[in-house]
Image: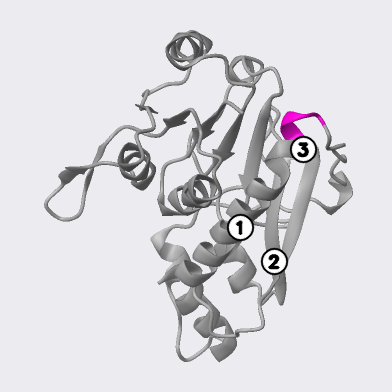
Amino acid sequence: MKYFFFGTPKFSAAVLKKLIDGGMPPSGVVSNPDRPAGRKKIITSPPTKVLALEHGIPVYQPEKLSKLEIENWKLEIGEPEFAVVAAYAKIIPREVINAFPKGIIGVHPSLLPKYRGASPIQSAILNGDKETGVTLYQMDEKIDHGDILVNDKFQMTNSKITYEELEERLAELAGDLLVKILPDFAESGIKPAAQDESRATFTKKFSTQDGFVDLDKDDPAIIYRKVRALN
């Protein structure tokens, strides 16, 4: 089973680790380029790159994705059937999606079509949701829009759970789900289901302003959620 894995941050690395530990490592990993990090602006490799190199998996770090680059990578590692994208942080163009015979599986940390966009985990905490989850879907050119392959729910029974804790739990859930369904997906044994557009909700990127609180006026419950979601 040959496939590419697209992903960059800690969430992606947790999903990738599950795939490697489950005996289903990708043929290649695509991540963002190394970037300056921290106060000293030290050039730092993405977590997915570090993990992939530890396991001898080729890593590609283009500034901009193109079909030509994908075709060149295919010559190096053989013909991948599909790809998996988990928090890659770049838009995947249609020509790249079409470069894979079976398309691309998107990993999204919400129960789509709820919480499409950039901040589904924070939004679930901020809104006081009792339930969230992960969705694996067939990517198209729109954001978090394609047909659903499978999803799994996570009960937020811990009212103190923070963004980092929930991110880790959902990444592990997504990785386990991928290990479970990839063999069937590779054999075209999964029938996707269209998302219900009437139930779609959208999230945004947060700014510093979104983290401000007014201790005299704000509901204490809202302040507590902001601390857990945005700290």
Asked which quadrant contains residue 221, the reply is bottom right
Count of all numbered marks drawn on residues in the image:
3
Q: Which residues are magenta?
A: 184-188
Q: Was residue 186 drawn as part of the magenta stretch in this picture? A: yes
Q: Are marks 2 and 1 in contact (CB under 8 Å)?
A: yes
Mark 2 — residue?
A: 132
The residue lying at 49 percent from left, 71 percent from top is: 165
Q: Is residue 41 visible?
A: yes
Q: Nearer the viewer, mark 1 or mark 3?
A: 3
Where is residue 99? Give x, y as percent.
62, 14
Amino acid on which the number 1 mark rests in the picture: Pro
Callout 1 crowding tier (Cα within 10 Å): few <14, some 14–19, many ≥20: many
Amino acid on which the number 2 mark rests in the picture: Thr
Callout 2 crowding tier (Cα within 10 Å): few <14, some 14–19, many ≥20: many
* Mark positioned earlier in the residue sequence (1 or 3): 1
Most foreground residue, 190 or 143: 190
Amino acid on which the number 3 mark rests in the picture: Asp
Mark 1 — residue?
A: 120
